[in-house]
Image (cartoon, rainbow, N blue to C red):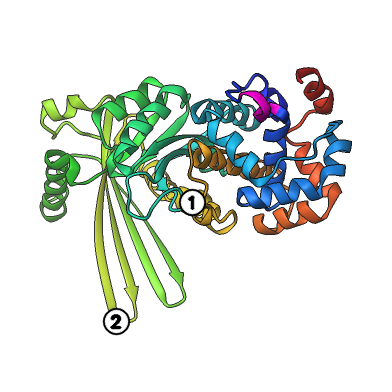
Amino acid sequence: MTLVETFSGLPDKRRGPAKRYVLMETVVMAVCATLCGADNWAEVADWCRDRQEWLREQFGWALKGGTPSQDTFGDIFRVLDGSVFEERFRQWVAGLVGVVEGVVAFDGKTLRGSGKKGSNELLHRVTAYAVGSGLCLAQEGTCGKGHELAGLKNLLEVLILKGCIATTDALGCQTEVAEKIVDRGGDYVLQVKDNQKNLAEAIREFFEEGNQAGFGRLNVQRFEEIEKDHGRIETRRYTWIHDVSWMDKPMRQAWKKLGGVGMIESVREIGNTVHTEHRYAIGSSGVQTVAMFANASRNHWGIENGLHWTLDVVFREDHCRARKGHSARNFSVLRKFALATLRKDEDSKMGLRRRRVHADRHQDYRESLISLAFSATASEDIMLSV
């Protein structure tokens, strides 16, 4: 879907003079401004005011009343239904990405500027991230970190995961989550910690006893990788056992299509200091080899560097003070639109921050980016929908 098609028919709850700006035009302006470096409503308003002539020429808009002010942008996105905006993003990015393959990582992040520090009003966003393509597939906004699990379950209701391995941290290690992933056509690798106490103890004891006395006739697959960086040496040893017949039957049957258990031993050496950590996980029957387990476990953390870090550093997400109504939730989606468009430009050698600056300064590059999301008849479509 093009961005124009995505925004067609957005519910407009404004009344009276507040409707002096066309909703679709306002949303498209905000997307363009965010793509070109705007990180808050003041910067969005400034960019649109400075680019009025380009907006008129590019989209065929009259803009007789000029462009919205900072407060108007904030008010419009405050009342725009956040769940509807997120749904439109999912539909658009599905067309942009096509068939998703590989690891889809689910994780949550708190927007620190969305409320008072330490309050339960802070917006917490749960995201599904396709590690291979570097694109966010969907997000679910919740108030407070305590609702992260509910947000995860909601995402699993709408995503198709056929051919994918879904990964979560320990919070997502729930029988209901595993069942939803399988029902959506996917496989899973879920981290196991003490929030699943009986399962964690059983797996921990199984590996400790096996490492000491052997695993008998069980097929044990192992894989090791070593990373060296600035005096730090990190060795990760992966162990994957596809046979779970040793596990108590009620525990085994509680996890849909349970097909294996794994352990990751991480040994970090910095000078004379050595730190060893063991992590455990379960996986579904589609995770058949230690290579698949290692790849899924390693790629899960791609959401931290590829998405969360990028949003903080490139888009200054935690500095944004959009707070009222749906404002923070909707601005979060705007960043995802911009990030997806920037990453769709696979030929550029520039970093994401430079691409935003380049798009702001160079009209040709800006239009080439926008063409990845807007059809050639975008202006016609917009005018017909007004």
Q: Which residues are magenta?
A: 15-19
Kind of residue at disc 2:
Asn
Q: Is residue 16 left or right of residue 240?
A: right
Q: Is residue 157 left or right of residue 219?
A: right
On screen, residue 352 above or below 327: below
Question: To which quarter of the image does residue 232 belong?
Answer: bottom left
Q: Magenta region's main secondary structure?
A: helix
Quarter of the picture containing the N terminus is: top right
**Measured Cα–Cα span from mark 2 to mark 1:** 32 Å
Instruction: Report x, y in % for residue 118.
Output: 32, 54
Q: Residue at position x 72%, y 39% from top?
A: 29
Q: Is residue 171 left or right of residue 97?
A: left
Earlier in the chain: of badge 2 and badge 1, it is 2
The residue labelled by disc 2 is 272
Q: Is label 2 or label 1 in front?
A: 1
Helix, strand or loop status at disc 1: helix
The residue labelled by disc 1 is 308
- Depth check: give the residue in front, 207 or 160: 160
